[in-house]
Amino acid sequence: MIDTVMHRVSAVFLSILLLSAIPLNGQKKRAATPFVFTPQWTAQAQFAGYYVAQEKGFYEEAGIVVVIEHPNSTRTALDRIRKNQSQATTLPVAQAMEVMDSGIPLVNILQTSMNSGLMLVSRRGKDPLQQRGATASCFRAGFSQLAICMAQEKQLDYNWIEAANMLNLFVAGAIDVALCMSYNEYYQLLQTGLIDLPSEGVVCRLSQEGYNIQEDGVYMTRDAFRKDSERALKFAAASRRGWEYAAEHPDEALEIVMRYVRKHHIATNPVLQRLMLQEILRLMENEDGVRSYTLEPEMVNRCSQLLLEARIIRNPHPIESFRP
Amino acid sequence: MSKRIGLLQRIQSSLSARISLWTVLFAALVFSAALLVLGVRSRRAVREEAYKTASQVLDNTVYRVNDILESVELVADNMEWLIYKNLDNPDAMLEISHNVVQGNSFLNGCSISFEPYFYPQKGRYFSAYSNNNGRYVYTIQEGEEDYQYFYLNWYMLPKLLLQPVWTEPYSDQEIADEGKMSLEMTVSYCKPLIGNDGNFIGVLSLDVSLKWFSDMISDVKPYKDSYAFLIGRGGSYLVHPDPDKLFYETLFTPALVGEAPPEQIQLGKDMLDWKEGMYQFKEKGKAASYVFFKPLMHTGWSIAIVCPVYSIFGGFNRLRNVMLLNILIGLLLQFLVLYKVISKLLRPLKHLAGHAETIASGNFEVTLSPMDRTDEIGVLNRSFRYMQSSLITYIDELTQSTAKRERIEGELQIARDIQMGMVPRVFPAFPERRDIDMYADMFPAKEVGGDLYDYFIQDEKLYFCIGDVSGKGVPASLFMAVARNLFRVVAGQGMTPEEVARQINDTISRDNQQMMFITLFIGLIDLRSGSFHFCNCGHNPPIVLSRSGAAPHFLDCHPNVPVGVAQGFVFQGQCLENFRDTPLLMYTDGLTEAEDADHQLLGEDRVMEALSATPYTNAANTVLLLLDTVHAHVKDAEQSDDLTLLCINTL
């Protein structure tokens, strides 16, 4: 089932990347409609700050009505944005850069991630960086750009397999190396019992290999932002408040996340969500332990440079192009 | 607390209770040991039986599941040639898949899917898919832009592994909105299709509803509250009675946050390694359980049966509890019966104790009835009665002898008074005469003694004597009385001391069958002339004192022999002229031989030291001084010999 869902999400998602934003409706109508936020994935602790802001009434206090609508197999986050059904979504920097390179100008209104959660996990009990020519899975839905860049630069010569869900491929031994998010798939792999902790010997974190590029941020199409900037900035501020509250009250935040998880019947469990929230909060802190909620120019420039070298994008995208 | 102490004291004070308690405790110990051995062995047997039962149930379940799996694999093997035969006709694939589903009711669906553009005329996607929706079988080509099957597990696994493979369960819903997890799960047997050139060209996939297995496995309940679960190759629960765990959790989920017991982790690893076995462990918040597990080799899955310990050992525990209760009741009854029997057997002891107390209070007349028992209690009864009669006799004898002794003691006291009345004890001895300073005292070692002294004046002559009869007590006192009377009679005739000695000696020696003798010092001071005439008959020589402070010394006198030793002995007298104002101290050996507690004698030297240290003042002081010296030496020791002191000074 997960296969089916993920496949459909990714298929629609990618097709939408090629489309440009549809002109938005009039200001009055906009003001009357709620601000729809669509996270890039199904309900999980990766989006805890937004759920907390909603449940604790931070959006309401900011004077905006926010609706959180998750993507599904027929309507991805960017599809919703394109059809003006959703005002904002979350994307990693590299993914946003690829979308912008395809001709859709995006505005970053809130940057939550300060670190990369990408990691490679090996099945054979070896360092993934030592497995040249291995069969490696990457995300069918994107987000894999920097791992591909690193593999190229390190001449790992991986045979990259796009998979909607790499978990069963990994378990069945069909792939040697799996590209994971440290807050999600990594814990799912640990949950299979195939990897013993500590996992240092079979894990490679991109953040420790010179590929520490920020990930999740909240993006709007530039047109949408221009026409609804006031609500967008309120949404960003209230969301930030939600994340701060989640960081200070992780147990309560986890309860809220689990309410969303149950409501949407997500195949997960409280343990995974608790670990995901811990890791997401860790990734939100910069090297000084501060959640700054800003894009780091060095990281953006490095990302742009890496993607250009890997020919994933054609034009450089400096940090200014993301700014409102 | 006080109640407990009271009970303890009652047990301690009751022999019946103690014997009963020890017997019951010992029995309890024996029963406990037997129960322990029985319990350990029984538990082992029950566990082995449970293992056997679970293994049989597991074998049966695995067999039934494998039966379905093998049926599916057989269908795949049997239809494969049709695909290859019609490989150039894509529309035939639709028909083949339709017929397969139609012909095999246990199949949910069948897809024959090909690599992109394998059939150029069909475009990028071609997947012939038939599905049995419960009412009819429909067939479609399901590959499209929105359903890129190449990226799905059921297609990728056989493609990557190039061998037939069973997928993990997945939802067979057309569209699973918002990732909604359905319990209608499907597993697929997927076979790679290989072209003539040996290249991978597509996948044949046969779908079976997981419900086939889950119903079968859910029914497995060999024990009360037991349940079975099925895990996939990634440890996830494919069948489990708890819907929160189903597809959402794995055996290792609790281990991620350190909440899994090590046995659970090992169980998971063993199940993933397709091992067979048993573990016992306790999950947080749940009862301890045994888990029996066995792999399903076709799929790589593993089935486990979880049996709570309490249900496996339920029958055993009930039996054990009944036995324990019976034993407890038995021990209690044993205690009560023992207590009663022993109390009855020991009851005569109580009577004996009562009689003993009565006798001890002085009532010897109480009678103890005889007993016809031959055991220890009977022996004790007889012994007690014998003791009682012996005691009565003894007490009678004791009463008589005590009365006799008291009478003798009374007589002796009278004898003492008589004896003490025989010697002059009033001082000053001659109050009308200022020229005589005299003092004397006598202390018999027993009631009566053998010492004597006496003095009298006749014709201005002062006669005096001091003596010591051999031996002590009544015989010596009688002898002393005889000697004293003889002295009075003989000396009263105006004889010299040596004549007096001779007369007395002859008289005593004549009928002296007891061979008793007496040492005597007989003196005569002529108060007019001041001469001192004396005869010493084997007595201690007197000590000559001085008023002027000169050192005391023994009177130089001829020893002769004691009176009564040799009849007809001629005693030799001595005479000193001008003896006025020469104090003379006479004594018996009770002075120099006074013994302290360590039998050390006072001795002549210490007597002389005492006399030297204190200048002579008068006769009484000298006697008292020596008595003090004796008392200081003897202290609390019993007096060893009769003591007599006589001091005379004439002016």
Image (cartoon, coloured by chain):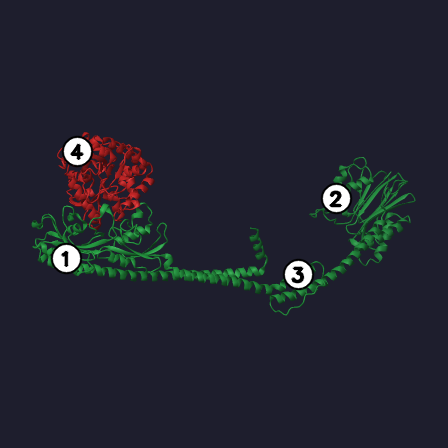
The amino acid sitting under disc 1 is His
Q: Is residue A140 left or right of residue B240?
A: left
Chain B: its colour in the image is green
- Disc 2 versus disc 3: nearer the observer: 3
* Residue, far top: A320
* Chain identifier of the residue bearing label 4 in the image: A
Which numbered disc covers residue B631? 2
- Secondary structure at badge 3 equals helix
Q: Which residue is mark 4?
A: A105
Q: Of B345 and B523, which appears nearest the observer?
A: B345
User: Tag 3 or tag 1, which sits nearer the N-term?
Assistant: 1
To the question of a shared chain for discs 4 and 1, the answer is: no
Q: Of A229 and A111, which appears nearest the observer?
A: A229
Distance, label 4 to label 2, CA atoms, is 136 Å
Chain A: its colour in the image is red
Q: Is residue B491 above or below residue A89?
A: below
The reply to whether callout 4 and callout 1 are in contact (CB within 8 Å) is: no
Q: Is residue A55 above or below residue A192?
A: above
Distance, label 1 to label 3, CA atoms, is 110 Å
- Secondary structure at badge 2 equals helix
To the question of a shared chain for discs 2 and 3, the answer is: yes
* Chain identifier of the residue bearing label 2 in the image: B
Residue A2 visible from this viewpoint: yes
Distance, label 4 to label 1, CA atoms, is 48 Å
Which numbered disc covers residue B354? 3
Q: Is residue B120 left or right of residue B504?
A: left
